[in-house]
């Protein structure tokens, strides 16, 4: 457009100059006056054109400067937003790192306290002379106890998980956790083998507490992968009543209360029925954080379900064979020996009325499934659905306590015991 405007303006200026020159010539000015008028008019027109051009260029330049300023303001605004976002991200990352560091520090501190108390307990036990060490049975017990101590010293405590499935689909919905010890040859020691010597020495509580920590870590790991699977973790009455361990463990769970829906604490029916005021109060504190409970080792079906509901017990594990042996055929139909006034198929409805689901455990044969389903039981556990399997080494290593700390403290006590015996 500007290329076309310039020739048009030049033609206009030339036309005006010619008109002026002809006017002067016709009015008697002669050729000289006409030429002078033409030249003067052209000079005037082009001077005026230059002024107009500079004005237009100045205006265009001003608009460009305004556009640059506007773009600069927009860029500054975006930079401010980006800076604010980066600051927010840095702050969030720093806060998250600080929180994780505090959590890790707290967990390590709790583990150190736990191991320290375990070491003190070992030291007290080791200072006492062995009982019946001269007899073959005594020597066997002493050797087995030493094997258990060495397993703890070398952190040879493995975590096993067994699936709990929904019936009849048999899809895994929960896991139950177990702890197993390994001797120096790698042989797995079952609880029935070492409990008889570990329990009098106060080592079972230490093993249970270690299992609790690992369960929290495993559930946290599963939550990161968005796996909606809960884990049943055994908790002993001694752990619930431990005035030193439990407050620290409660702090750990309070910092991880988002895992409450995936971690179920389990204790035996006898332990639940004999719980004291301290245990009941600490169970209530866990329930206030949203954690649920389960009872296993059930030997009596005549249960106070209102007490279960008050204590936030949501699951009842009953051995499949024990449950089927309770069935009794009467004139009124099939009933359970422990509660003959209730039809057997109504037992699960009764428990659900109080928010309690039944899990048939120790299911070993397919023929048991038919009877279990007729009782409207929706969960099963046992070797038929899967045996307990050890967590792979890499994942287990991420849930280990400070191994060096465990080894240092426990080995010190073992050596001290060896010197005393020697």
Image: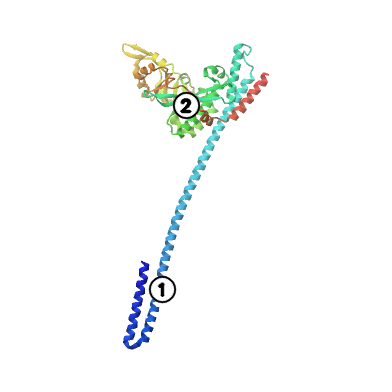
- Real-space Cα distance between discs 1 and 2? 95 Å
Q: What residue is rendered at 37% in x and 83% in y?
A: 37
The quarter of the picture where residue 12 lies is bottom left
- Residue 49 position, x and y percent, is 39, 74
Q: Decide which of tag 1 and tag 2 comes sooner along the chain.
A: 1
Q: Residue furthest front?
A: 31
Q: Is residue 265 left or right of residue 409?
A: left
Secondary structure of the residue carrying numbered label 2: helix
Q: Quadrant of the N terminus?
A: bottom left
- Residue 84 position, x and y percent, is 47, 49
Colour scheme: rainbow
Q: What residue is rendered at 44% in x and 60% in y?
A: 68
**Residue 50 numbered tag:** 1
Q: Is residue 95 visible?
A: yes
- Residue 114 position, x and y percent, is 57, 28
Q: Is residue 148 left or right of residue 80?
A: right
Which sits in the foreground, 208 or 163? 163
Q: What residue is rendered at 50% in x and 31% in y?
A: 217
**Residue 39 numbered tag:** none
Q: Is residue 290 visible?
A: no
- Residue 108 position, x and y percent, is 56, 32
Which sits in the foreground, 409 or 21? 21
Query: What residue would you read off at disc 2?
Result: 283
Tell me how many marks there are.
Answer: 2
Which sits in the foreground, 191 or 127? 191
Q: Quadrant of the C terminus?
A: top right
Dot 2, how many residues are within 10 Å of its Cα: few (below 14), some (14-19), or many (20+)? Answer: many
In front: mark 1 or mark 2?
1
Dot 1, how many residues are within 10 Å of its Cα: few (below 14), some (14-19), or many (20+)? Answer: few
Secondary structure of the residue carrying numbered label 1: helix
């Amino acid at each position: 457009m500007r290329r076309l405007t310039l020739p048009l303006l030049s033609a206009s200026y030339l036309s005006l100059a010619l008109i002026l020159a002809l006017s002067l010539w016709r009015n008697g000015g002669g050729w000289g006056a006409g030429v002078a008028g033409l030249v003067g008019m052209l000079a005037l027109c082009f001077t005026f054109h230059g002024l107009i051009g500079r004005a237009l260029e100045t205006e265009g330049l001003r608009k460009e400067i305004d556009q640059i300023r506007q773009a600069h303001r927009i860029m500054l605004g975006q930079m401010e937003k980006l800076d604010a976002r980066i600051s927010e991200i840095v702050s969030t990352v720093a806060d998250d790192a600080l929180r994780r560091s505090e959590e890790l520090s707290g967990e390590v501190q709790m583990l150190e306290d736990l191991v320290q108390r375990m070491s003190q307990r070992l030291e007290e036990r080791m200072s006492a002379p062995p009982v019946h060490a001269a007899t073959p049975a005594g020597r066997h017990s002493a050797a087995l106890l030493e094997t258990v101590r060495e397993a703890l010293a070398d952190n040879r405590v493995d975590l096993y998980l067994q699936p709990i499935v929904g019936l009849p689909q048999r899809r895994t919905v929960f896991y139950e956790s177990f702890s197993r010890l390994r001797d120096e040859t790698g042989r797995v020691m079952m609880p029935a083998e070492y409990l008889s010597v570990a329990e009098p020495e106060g080592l079972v509580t230490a093993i249970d507490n270690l299992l609790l920590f690992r369960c929290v870590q495993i559930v946290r790991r599963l939550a990161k992968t968005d796996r909606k699977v809960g884990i049943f973790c055994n908790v002993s009455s001694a752990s619930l009543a431990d005035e030193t361990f439990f407050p620290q463990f409660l702090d750990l769970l309070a910092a991880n209360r988002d895992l409450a829906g995936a971690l179920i604490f389990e204790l035996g029916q006898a332990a639940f029925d004999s719980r004291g005021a301290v245990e009941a109060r600490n169970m209530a504190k866990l329930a206030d954080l949203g954690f649920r409970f389960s009872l296993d080792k059930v030997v009596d079906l005549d249960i106070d379900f209102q007490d279960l509901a008050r204590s936030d017990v949501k699951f009842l594990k009953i051995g499949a064979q024990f449950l089927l042996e309770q069935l009794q055929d009467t004139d009124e139909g099939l009933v359970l020996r422990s509660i003959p006034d209730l039809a057997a198929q109504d037992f699960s409805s009764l428990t659900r009325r109080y928010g309690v689901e039944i899990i048939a455990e120790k299911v070993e044969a397919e023929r048991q499934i038919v009877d279990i389903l007729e009782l409207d039981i929706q969960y099963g556990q046992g070797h038929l659905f899967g045996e307990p399997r050890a967590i792979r080494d890499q994942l287990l290593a991420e849930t280990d306590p400070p191994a060096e700390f465990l080894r240092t403290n426990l080995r010190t006590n073992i050596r001290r015991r060896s010197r005393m015996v020697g």
